[in-house]
Image (cartoon, rainbow, N blue to C red):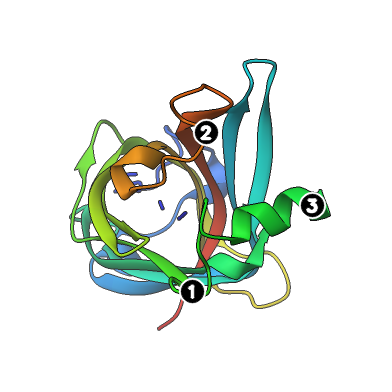
Amino acid sequence: MALAGYFKSTVTGATISAGLVISTAAQAEPHRYELDPEHTTIAFMVDHLGYADTLGVFLEFEGSFTYDMDTQKLSDLKVTVQTASVESFNEARDNHVLNKDFLDVTNHPVMTFTANGGTPADDTSGVVAGELTLLGKTQPLTLDVTLNKAAKYPFGHGRFTLGISAQGVVKRSDFGMTYAVENGFVGDDVQVIIETEAWRAD
């Protein structure tokens, strides 16, 4: 389920560390970013019978957005998740989640989150308000987002990379997923958790 702050506008030694200082000139234009699939987790937690939350993840996805570090402008954010890639670490439960009671992956193989802007709270946090499409229905979804780090990657691909944490809440019944809501066996509210490294694509 989806992203996920508003992302940090200007990286300075005062807000993170001297090691992350980058020139204003390098930040003064929008750039395209892509989610690094090897360093991205899209997860969810949902209450089970009031005893504990069940954790699940989606293993197949792609996402990108355009962001200007100088002006704080976010645009063209889209994350697409393959619903059949769900994993809750229990085969019987996963098979149930795949069917029509929950994700109905045969008829709805993808879910998407899109956004075209956000509201910064400070240099490293804010909200991104967008839309989640799931089970053929589109509903608003707001993510609280924190920028953990913004710097050139120290090895490997070596690209300028944003480290981002995002969280939000989805109500299953808003999408017609009402199985076990009325009796309270499975929670209606689902917490969405996104941890990602997004590298600069251009």
Q: Which mark is residue 92?
A: 3
**Amino acid on which the number 3 mark rests in the picture:** Ala
Residue type at the position of mark 2: Ala
Residue under label 1 = 109
Crowd class of label 2 (few under 14; some 14 to 19; many from 20; radius 10 Å) = some
Asked if the residues shown at circle 3 and circle 1 are in contact, with their CB atoms under 8 angstroms apart, the answer is: no
Residue appearing at x 56%, y 55% in the figure:
196
Task: Say if mark 3 contacts mark 2, CB within 8 Å.
Answer: no
* Residue on which the image places disc 2: 180
Cα separation, mark 3 vs mark 2, equals 16 Å
* On screen, residue 170 above or below 70: above
SS class, disc 3: helix
What's the distance in space between the residues labelled 3 and 1, CA to CA? 19 Å
- 191 and 172: which one is in front? 172
Give the camera-side residue of 146 and 92.
Answer: 92
Observer-side mark, 2 or 1, equals 2
Q: What is the CA distance from the residue labelled 2 to the residue labelled 1?
A: 22 Å
First in sequence: mark 2 vs mark 1: 1
Is 195 situated left or right of 73 in this image? right
Query: Is residue 82 shown above or below 195?
Result: below
Residue 169 in the image: x percent, y percent? 40, 35
Q: Earlier in the sequence, mark 3 or mark 1?
A: 3
Residue 158 marker = none
Residue 51, image x, y percentages: 69, 16
Residue 195: % across, % down: 57, 49
Front-most of residues 104 and 4: 104
Tell me which residue sits at (62%, 53%) in the image.
97
